[in-house]
Image (tube, helix red, strand yellow):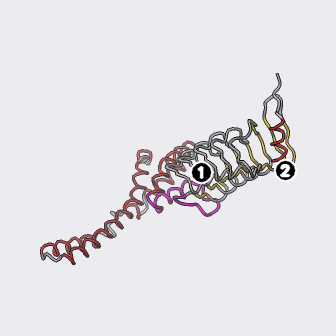
Amino acid sequence: MKNELSKKQIEFLNRGTEGTWSYNHATGFVDVEGNFAYYEIRSRLEDFKGIKFNKVSGNFSCSEEKLTSLEGAPQKVGGDFNCSWNKLTSLAGGPKEVGGDFNCEYNKLTSLEGAPKKVGGDFICLNNSLTNLEGAPQEVGEYFYCDAFGLREEGEWNLNIWINVLRKENIEAQKIISPFLFDMVNKEIAKDYEGTITNLKEIWNEEVLKKNQEDYMPKILYWRGKLNDAIQDMDSKEMLYAADKLAYFIERQKEVFHGENRTRLFLSTFIGLFD
């Protein structure tokens, strides 16, 4: 028995398609030659009306709706794919390849599982609740933006840049990057063992990573001494001042230590391969 589209599904496709669409009776998939964007003023989409898209040559937009799933979304989009401003908790069911930008900002995502493997333009996942980068694209042609950090130069999607992010970005960024970076290193080793190990070795031997990271230690010791003096003198005003200074420099030291030493700790996972 052949699959058939209902009258409402045909109307849905006609209203949203800028170009032409075709239906494969054998597979039940719909291809669009052109763009697809459906807007309903009175009620927002909660699903794709039971339609299963396959390929869309242009842009596909399902933003500002009430979608909780991308089930039925196209598997390949030649242009931009926009599913922003929905209620998505997962990108599962979405496209595997996007030629232009991929925008999933303003959803409820905690990871990027289900994201396309390859994005030709920008990848935008701002204003979500990401706890890790699992599922992130393996290739991004232009810029990558999330709440914790951004790669804002074309061609930055590579191992060295990600290690640099681990070293220099904030603690939140470092936490979500580490698992993703571990997977990336293993994939690079599988592709080019000698080249990747040489690269990691060079980073490991950088002087900035060899330092004891005591940039703020003299200040910490100084203000700890001042605090002890103030305590002995029972000088409450000086105690508060010294304690405030001590807390400030301890936090600065922690930040410096965290970035570079977290990187060295990460690299130590592979240190057995350096010999």
Position of residue 246 in the picture relative to residue 89 (left or right): left
Residue 53 locus on image (x, y percent): 76, 39
Find out whether residue 117 is within the magenta segment: no
Which amino acid lies under the numbered mark 1 shown in the image of this protein? Asn
Residue 106 in which image quadrant: bottom right
Which residue sits at x=55%, y=50%? 195
The magenta segment is 147-171
In the depicted view, which residue is nearer to us: 205 or 215?
A: 215
Q: Hey, which quadrant is residue 263 in on the image?
A: bottom left
Looking at the rendered structure, the kind of residue marked 2 is Glu
Judging depth in this view, the residue of 180 and 68 nearest the camera is 68
Q: Is residue 206 left or right of residue 192?
A: left
User: Which residue is identified by label 1?
Assistant: 107
Magenta residue check for 157: yes
Residue 18: numbered disc: 2
Query: Residue placed at 12% from the left, 73% from the top?
Result: 232
